[in-house]
Amino acid sequence: MAEYLVLLHEDPAATRQLSPTEMQALIQRYSDWVDGLRVEGVVSVGKKLKDEGGRHLRAEKGKMVVSEGPYAEGKDIISGLFVVTADSYEQAQARLASGPHLEFGWIELREIDVIPD
């Protein structure tokens, strides 16, 4: 089986209109979904990222330049990540299809390359 990195992308405005009760219900749906994947033994990492956007690091003229992200004009943030195991992209896609994220965001799915020791 291969491992796949799952990046959850979303526009933060997509869930701002949810009431506290609706937001709690959505969080519960995510928890139930990930718990189900864990029970199946196909998720090894599952993390929600903080909404504050983190930092962007890049080099300019040989020095690290740090800026806070995401940029104000950006409408796409990565809100969470998972590592799932599957035999193929299609099987990984099928495992992700039942989750709530596609209702308001999109998922980036990347196979993790095996680097020999």
Image: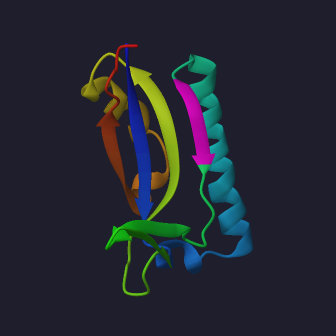
Residue 82 in picture, x, y percent from top left: 51, 39
In the image, 62 versus 92, the foreground residue is 62
Residue 17 in picture, x, y percent from top left: 57, 80
Q: Quadrant of residue 109?
A: top left
Q: Is residue 16 above or below residue 99?
A: below
* Magenta: main secondary structure: strand
Q: Quadrant of residue 97?
A: top left
Q: How is the image coloured?
A: rainbow
Looking at the figure, which quarter contains the C terminus? top left
In the image, 22 versus 52, the foreground residue is 52
Q: Is residue 1 above or below residue 65?
A: above
User: Is residue 69 shown to the viewer in this render?
Assistant: no
Q: Residue furthest front?
A: 62
Q: Is residue 72 left or right of residue 79?
A: left
Q: Looking at the image, which residue is at 31% across and 73% down?
A: 61
Q: Is residue 106 left or right of residue 24?
A: left
Q: Quadrant of residue 18?
A: bottom right
Q: Looking at the image, which residue is at 42% across and 48% down?
A: 7
Q: Is residue 53 left or right of residue 108?
A: right
Q: Is residue 18 above or below residue 43?
A: below
Q: Is residue 82 left or right of residue 86?
A: right
Give the extent of the magenta segment: 43-47
Count of numbered badges drawn on the protein? 0
Residue 105 in picture, x, y percent from top left: 40, 61
In magenta segment, residue 86: no
Q: Is residue 42 above or below residue 24?
A: above
User: Is residue 90 shown to the viewer in this render?
Assistant: yes
Looking at the figure, which quarter contains the N terminus? top left
